[in-house]
Image (cartoon, rainbow, N blue to C red):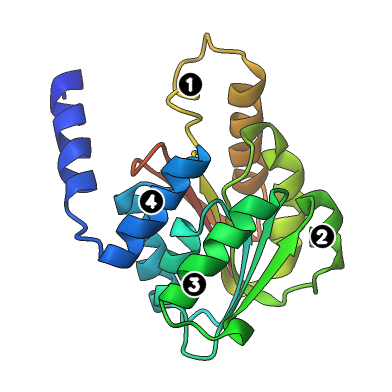
Amino acid sequence: MSTEAKFSNWSYIESRPVETDLFARARERSHALGVPAVSPAVARLLTVLCTTNKASTVVEVGTGAGVSGLALLEGMTSNGVLTTIDTDADHIRAAKEGFAEAGYRSNRTRTIIGRAEAVLPRLADQGYDVVFLDAQVADLPRYIEQSTRLVRPGGLVLVNDALDQDRVPRPQDRSETAVSAREAERLLNDDDRFLTTLLGVGTGLLVAVRRH
């Protein structure tokens, strides 16, 4: 398949989700803060995966302005709780605004301002249905190690930007982030407890399910 055809397919897939005004406003907050948000296709896939998994406990590393959080909550059970972690108080504030605007009760979200490497070790072993990593690519390998501990059998570890802005497929690219993204994928692929696949939505979504 030609590069042009591949781009055409990707563009078509990304154009398919029809997002609500809630998502549009969350994306506007993301733009105003200068923080990247997951693509529409990734957002929709997060909702689908949480719905399929009947997720009630979800951890998100990298709150941003709440676009991905809204997608996760949309697919979670009606009493599910999203724990979302970010180092930036402005990001958390923007996300909370979006969650409240969407009508989610305050007890449906647990927002934590802090570094994930300090927060994740305090969370319960096999206590979560989904862990979504939307963090700095260079930090992914050490977050993977915590994520595999956190998810229950049947649970999912999801990694956004797994292709590191298309650097990963280029073997000659040995930049720090490309190396880290490859290492994150290797850690999950080499873990016999998990079944892993890499999807081409957005800038790559790595999906790993913990075997029963």
Q: CA distance from mark 3 to mark 2?
A: 22 Å
Which of these two is toward me, 62 or 49? 62
Q: Position of residue 24 (x, y in %)?
A: 31, 56
Q: CA distance from mark 4 to mark 3?
A: 13 Å
Type of amino acid under label 4: Arg
Type of amino acid under label 2: Val
Give the side of residue 32 with respect to residue 135, left or right.
left
Residue under numbered circle 4: 27
Kindly tell me whether residue 195 is visible in this rendering.
Answer: yes
SS at circle 3? helix
Q: Position of residue 187 (x, y in %)?
A: 67, 43
Quadrant containing the C terminus is bottom right
Labels 4 and 2: the sequence-earlier one = 4
Labels 4 and 3: the sequence-earlier one = 4
SS at circle 1? loop
Type of amino acid under label 1: Arg
Q: Residue 167 — which label?
A: 1
Residue 111 lies in quadrant: bottom right
Q: CA distance from mark 4 to mark 1?
A: 25 Å
Residue under numbered circle 3: 99
Residue under numbered circle 2: 119
Q: CA distance from mark 1 to mark 2?
A: 29 Å
- Alpha-carbon neighbours of circle 4 within 10 Å: few (<14), some, or many (≥20)? many
Which of these two is toward me, 161 or 181? 161
